[in-house]
Amino acid sequence: MLRPGALHRGSRIVVASHNEGKVRELGELFEPYGIECVSAGSLSLPEPEETGETFEANALLKAHAAAAGSGMIAIADDSGLEVEALGGYPGIHSARWGGPAKDFDHAMQRVQAALEATGGGFRRANFTCALALAAPNGEEAVFTGRVFGAIVWPPRGDRGFGYDPIFVPEGYEETFGEMDPALKNDLSHRMRAFEQLIEATYAEDEDENAS
Ligand code: IMP
C-alpha cells in the first residue's frame, strides 16, 4: 500500500497513457503539489491491453506496466460513462463505443438509441474515474471518483470531450460540454478520485518509511 509521503514535492512520476490530453490534465492536477509528470509515450513504454473487467483493474494493470517499464512510480486513469438503464454500459467500453475512429458523435448516438430502446424515461448516469498508482516494487493504491447526473438529447456544447455534450451533472442545467471547463474540473469524477489519492499518498516531504 502506498502511504502519505510516497508522493512528495519533487517527485517525478510517469503517466501510463499515450493520450496527450490525459497526460496534460493529470500534469495540471499534480503541478500545484510540486510533482512532475512524464508520459509513457515519451519513454516509449508499450501500452498493455485493457483486459480487466472494472475501471480499477484496468487502471492498475496500466500503472503496473508503466512502473515496471520505467522504474518510476506510475499513475494510470481509467474512466467512462455508466448509464443506469443500460446496466452500466458503455462503462469500461466507453472509449471503444467510439469505434476505431474515436467518433464520439457516433458513440453518443449509440447511447441515445440504446436508451430509446428501453423506453427512454430513466436517464440517470454517472461518469466514473479510477486512478491507480503503482511503484516498481509492486506496491499499489487505487481511488475511484464518480459524478452523478442525467443523459440529455440532443447533445449540447463543444467545450469538453467524449460524452460531455450529453451529460448534465446533478444540480446544474448545463451539460459538461457547455460548462466552463474550470467548473467541470471541480465537479468531475477525475478530481474526486484525485483528491482521495492526494489525501492517501501525498506529504510535502518524503517519508522515509514510505516507498
Ligand atoms: P479510457 O481511455 O479507456 O479510460 O477511456 C475513457 C473514455 O471515457 C473516453 O474516451 C471518453 O469517451 C469517456 N470519458 C471519460 N471521462 C470523460 C469525461 O470527463 N467526459 C466525457 N467523456 C469521458
Image (tube, rainbow, N blue to C red):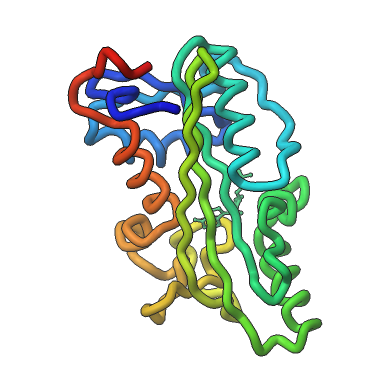
Q: Which of the 4 quarters of the picture holds residue 166?
A: bottom right
Instruction: Please report the residue visible at 49 percent of the width from the left and 38 percent of the height from the top.
Output: 142
Residue 112 visible within the image = yes
Q: Is residue 119 left or right of residue 189?
A: right
Depth check, front residue: 37 or 105: 37
Q: Which of the 4 quarters of the picture holds residue 12?
A: top left
Residue 21 visible within the image = no
Q: Position of residue 44 (x, y in %)?
A: 59, 15
**In the rendered view of the protein, which quadrant contains the N terminus?**
top left
Instruction: Please report the residue visible at 32 percent of the width from the left and 58 percent of the height from the top.
Output: 186
Q: Position of residue 16 (x, y in %)?
A: 54, 28
Instruction: Please report the residue visible at 31 percent of the width from the left and 62 percent of the height from the top.
Output: 183
Q: Is residue 97 left or right of residue 64?
A: right
Depth check, front residue: 51 or 4: 4
**In the rendered view of the protein, which quadrant contains the C terminus?**
top left
Depth check, front residue: 96 or 89: 89
Q: Is residue 9 left or right of residue 151?
A: left
Instruction: Please report the residue visible at 41 percent of the width from the left and 36 percent of the height from the top.
Output: 24
